[in-house]
Amino acid sequence: MSAEPSTSTPAFFVPGSRIAVLLPLPLAGAYDYRVGDQALAAGDFVAVPLGQRHVTGVVWGAGAGDVPESKLRPVGRRLEAPPLPAVTRAFIDWVAAYSMAPAGAVLKMAMSVPAALDPAPGLVAVRLAASRPAALKETAARRKVLAAAARLPPLSPADLAREAGVGAAVVKGLLEAGALDAVELPRPPLFLPPDPTLAAPVLSPDQRAAADALVAAAAGGFSVALIDGVTGSGKTEVYFEAIAAALAGGRQSLVLLPEIALSAQWLERFSRRFGVRPAEWHSDLTDARRRDTWRAVARGEARVVVGARSALFLPYPELGLIVVDEEHDGAFKQEEGVSYHARDMAVVRGRLGGFPVALASATPSLETMANVQGGRYGLLHLPDRHAGAVMPEMNTVDLRRHPPPRGRWLSPVLVRALEETFAAGEQAMLYLNRRGYAPLTLCRSCGHRLQCPHCTAWLVEHRAAGRLICHHCGHFIRPPQKCPHCEAEDSFTACGPGVERVAEEAALLFPQARMAVMTSDTCASPHAAAEFVRRVAAHEIDLLVGTQIVAKGHHFPMLTVVGVVDADLGLEGGDLRAGERTHQLLSQVAGRAGRAERPGRVFLQTYQPDHPVMRALCSGERDGFIAREAAMRRDAGMPPYGRLAALILSGPDAGLLDGFAARLSRAAPHGGGMEVLGPAPAPMALLRGKHRRRFLIKAPRGVNLQAALRHWLGRVELPRGVRLQVDIDPYSFF
């Protein structure tokens, strides 16, 4: 890691100076420019010429000096946005170096709202002019407006018309006549400051001890602590105390959530604790809201931000705490564009800024547990559910002994449990991490399978929408009337279940039950997700059928039974984290049951009841399972005990791609414990019309993997038409 940046007054550059300007483009580095008539400082946003156009960039420091003075182009203008803080610039440089991405590509994530760099327009108001025009024609309506304007502060034209009891056209006419003046007022703050002094809920002794430890850590500069608590143990209330301490100390806080669309209950809890809602940051915000939020963060007005992983790159001037909730969740890994893991980069951001980072999870990642065991992270343990609730009873349903009827997917054991639940007036959940109606559609006559023409993937039937859809590129078709291979008519059949098919079966079995399907298709926005959560919490729904979107963070007091339709899904394949991920996900799903005074039961339908994951879930031996996973990874030299990187080559021409992959393979490094695997076709060998080849690089922990990769890639020229992406610490291998 680089040294902590200086936060002292930045260097100023007088007119005529040579400066480096970093542009939010995937370029090799910063470009040199000459300061114009206006002095500039590091961090200033500036408009500069690039070719025939002007682009906005950031003053990164003194120029490199490799461009002759005669060829330097002057900076156009400085924008009125608050300058990018020194610690944010250092963070951008660190992420770029670690991820091997161009610094400009990382800067683009911090400059994701270009409109925010220009001043937001003020509010237009009207007031009485200093003198009345001599030729003003007065009417009764106009006199009402002038009288109201004389006794009231400046108001918007609509408000003034309302106060005077006249139409808007009257106010407009007085403005045009010069009897009223238009003035611009500053906009009121977008976010009210949260109140850390409001009465907090009573914490249990374990919660209080953990909260006190987090608050104490804030006074000691940088640290990382894992809040390791079972589902329903009140981890959120614990880190709320740390947020309160940061607010009291005049610092901003950031909370990262893996599924910001599902934050409705979290936002309600925050509002009860602090009196106002925090600033939100996610892709579903309107452009105007994103612009205003970005500026509020940059000015320090947004004191608490809750957001998706991209919120990490907002320009906080006074950040003093980061919380990564559900730190184990794979959604924190970005794989498109700049590849980074937000959990790990949050730790880096805390170290650069000299403040604490809290990681929270009921099923911590192996990487985090290794850091705890190595003494690099602290551990705060919450072993019990809050308010006396108990953990649910875990049951495996052996599908070899209790199979569903032919053409069905719910075992008789699970069906009986659902019947008992509905008879008791309680709620249930069925979980299957597979969207749509069926994952595969094939011809009964010839066996032809309907596949995406652009991806190595089967088309998934979404019966409710009447489409077959590729979940990778979005390509869709209407269900064909005859097979394109053998031309047999009405020969296609759905194979396997998706959530729509499970819901169809449940509706036949329980016609009186009020049911809803919750997936990313039906919860396309935070508003839609919040409405789902409200309906379940209000017991307007008896049976919730959903994908992993239902597994995270919800608290439904009347939900007592969870059925996992296919617990084996995710255990197969070459993913080194398959067992760990399945254990985490099923633990989270199971944690939705019995979170209040009514006990919960969980039923895992499986063909492998003796699998280590199933045994760990049913016995509650999470730590033993983690220890076994860690031992296997350590023996194999895999993360977190070894290092991995992936090179993904893609392009439309398979021959060109294979030729370049062969040249790259011949130049691959050897020795030093490094092992280069590949090239090989990626499991998703065709994605969005591009062919894909992969290298996997394995190395011991002590190897400078980035330096080795830079040396290797610098020896081979990338041909036009081939894209190369580097993924340090890959999390998926598709």
Image (cartoon, grey):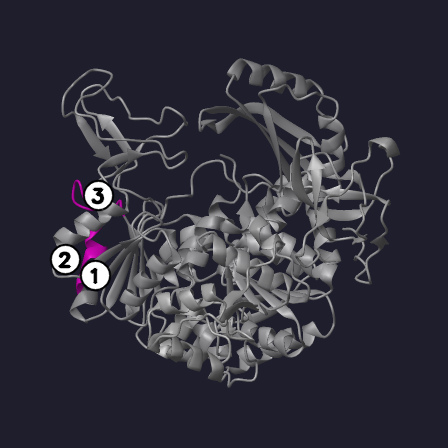
Residue 664 sits above or below residue 622 on the image: above
Question: Residue 418 bears which disc, if any?
Answer: 1
The secondary structure type at the circle numbered 2 is loop
Position of 669 with respect to 229 (left or right) is: right
From the image, tell me which residue sits under label 3.
Answer: 464
SS for callout 3: loop
Rendering coords of residue 478 (x, y %): 23, 31
Q: Is residue 225 visible?
A: no
Disc 1 secondary structure class = helix
In the rendered image, residue 51 lying in the magenta stretch gets the answer no
Examine the rendering and report whether any part of residue 478 can be seen: yes
Q: Which mark is residue 510?
A: 2
**N-term mark: 1 or 2:** 1
- In the foreground, 583 or 109: 109
- The vertical placement of 507 against 670, above or below, is below
Task: Identify residue type, mark 3.
Answer: Ala
Magenta residues, start to end? 399-419
Closer to the eye: label 3 or 2 = 3
Residue at left offset 45%, top offset 53%:
583
> Residue at coordinates 72% horizontally, 38% vertically from top-left?
705
Residue 412 is inside the magenta segment: yes
Q: Is residue 236 left or right of residue 532?
A: right
Q: Name the residue located 46 percent from the left edge and 66 percent from the top edge.
A: 177
